[in-house]
Amino acid sequence: MKIHDAAKSVLSQLSKVISQLNADDYSHPIVRLGNSTIGQHVRHTIEFFICMKDGMNTGIINYDSRSRDLILEESPDAALSAIRSILDYLKSSDNNTILNLEVDYGMDGHSVQTLRTNFDRELAYNIEHAIHHMAILKIGIKEISPDTKIPDNFGIAVSTLRHRKEQIQLN
């Protein structure tokens, strides 16, 4: 599967699950998740994709400078709209542009480093990042909305799925 198709698959899966949630469940603090909400994890995931997309215009990706848009964490409809926009972008882009990634791991916020990267590398990162948050989302959704239909492979890396399949075939 090509990387763009993998990203579309992950985002489509996320979209299908979000579309089943009402606004109250989407924005309800979940104790098991440190009082974070489904919406906060979804917003975080979406905004990484948005930063990557915006980086194509500026040549610079900085995930720390994401907008932290409250509407994306409070409204499942807004999140679904943002995901549709990202999916549309991925359908129209197939350019592995060289980019700069700005990172800052210092607590003072003044230790920015610039690293060379490219669009496909960042797309791969965003896929893995989304899958990680989808695993967290699965835990929260099962707690607050147990009737939500979650695909069996939701939040599981493809490499893990392949490994599990190999283990079954060996036994």
Image (spheres, helix red, strand yellow):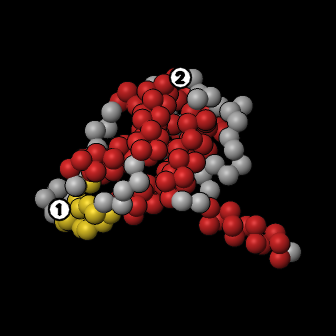
User: Given the image, on which type of amino acid does mark 1 rest?
Assistant: Val
Q: Which image quarter is the C terminus in?
A: bottom right
- Residue under the image location 61 percent in, 35 percent down: 16
Viewer-side residue, 63 vs 70 = 63
Residue 7 position, x and y percent, is 51, 51
- Residue under the image location 82 percent in, 69 percent down: 168
> Helix, strand or loop at disc 2?
helix
Residue 135 appears in the figure: no
Q: Residues within 10 Å of mark 2 (few under 14, many from 20)?
A: few
Would residue 7 appear left or right of 57 to someone viewing this image? right
Mark 1 to mark 2 CA distance (whole Å): 38 Å
Residue 14, picture quadrant: top right
Label 1 or label 2, whichever comes before in sequence order: 2
Would residue 64 appear left or right of 130 to someone viewing this image? left
Look at the numbered discs 1 and 2 and tell me whether their residues touch, using CB distance below 8 Å.
no
The residue pinned by badge 2 equals 24
Q: Residues within 10 Å of mark 1 (few under 14, many from 20)?
A: few
Q: Nearer the viewer, mark 1 or mark 2?
A: 1
Q: Residue furthest right?
A: 171
Residue 128 position, x and y percent, is 49, 58
Q: Is residue 24 above or below residue 115?
A: above
User: Given the image, on which type of amino acid does mark 2 rest?
Assistant: Asp
> Helix, strand or loop at disc 1?
loop
Residue 31 position, x and y percent, is 53, 39
Would residue 155 appear left or right of 129 to someone viewing this image? right
Q: Is residue 25 above or below residue 67?
A: above
- Residue under the image location 76 percent in, 72 percent down: 166
